[in-house]
Amino acid sequence: MLPQTQSRKDRERKAREELIVDHARRLLLSHGFQGFSLDDLARSIEYSKGTIYQHFESKEDLALAVATSALKERADLFERAARFQGKSRERARAIGFACCHFMVAYPDYFHVEMMMKSQSFWEKASEERRRQNAMQAGRTFRSMLEVVHAGFEAGDLSRERLSAEEIAIAMASVTVGSHIMSHVPEMRLLAGIDDSIRIVRQNQDLLLDGMGWKSLLADFDYAATDLRIRSEIFPEATWFQTP
């Protein structure tokens, strides 16, 4: 009888924590980190602030938990993408597709992630919350490394210029940077950007071509690859439009 009672309590605690994180995400988006308060959160979830402290040690602890929930969604998508069956460059393209799908499907999460990266709150968060965040970050990075190493092993990508880690960082940097820049109003106007996802994917291709990752864009039908990625890995990606 005792294990069942404990199991129910665990489920209730987990549900309460998910409720807290969900409402915290909304408040972070509407008020920013500085304007976000635990008092407002307590009123929103109709629990006492003491209840929040039963789950999170500080405001920074909670903010990191929100960012980690976003990172977990991204990691899940990356791991799905890494399982795509195809050439190494096609698998890299599936990772890029996953990035874009995350941006479209979870716009709030993406904005929270970016917001948290600009705040100096890391050291104020608990060690356990930092560990959970690092675990999800590791999942995303390992998925990219898996595909890069596949490129090395197939001879599609040179080992001489950059390490696998440097290539993975470059892939992440170009994708995130392109997404941010394509949403800056001045940049959209100056560059004539009308489709941010197209720009992100275009820059991903430019990077991989620049690394000499075969098959190069001009030498392979990646439109057919994209259709397979959508059909086999991300059938829910309704944003994807065929050329």
Image (tube, rainbow, N blue to C red):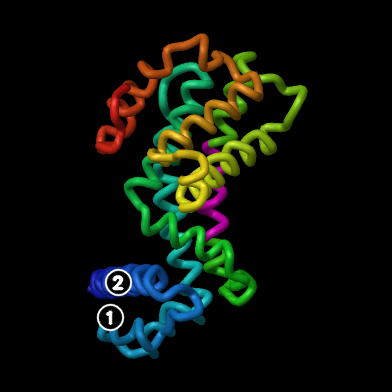
Quarter of the image for residue 207 reads: top right
Q: Amino acid at mark 2?
A: Leu
Label 2 element class? helix
Residue depicted at x 24% and y 70%: 4
**34 w.r.t. 197: above or below:** below
Answer left or right for 187 relative to 167: left
Dominant SS type (magenta):
helix
* Number of on-image labels: 2
Q: CA distance from mark 2 to mark 1?
A: 7 Å
Residue depicted at x 29% and y 29%: 241
Tell me which numbered mark, 2 or 1, is placed earlier along the sequence: 2
Q: Position of residue 240 (x, y in %)?
A: 30, 33
Q: Which residue is mark 2?
A: 19
Q: Position of residue 229 (x, y in %)?
A: 35, 26
Q: Amino acid at mark 1?
A: Ile
- Find the magenta span and give its range: 133-143
The image quadrant where one finds the C terminus is top left
The image quadrant where one finds the N terminus is bottom left
Q: Are marks 2 and 1 in contact (CB under 8 Å)?
A: yes
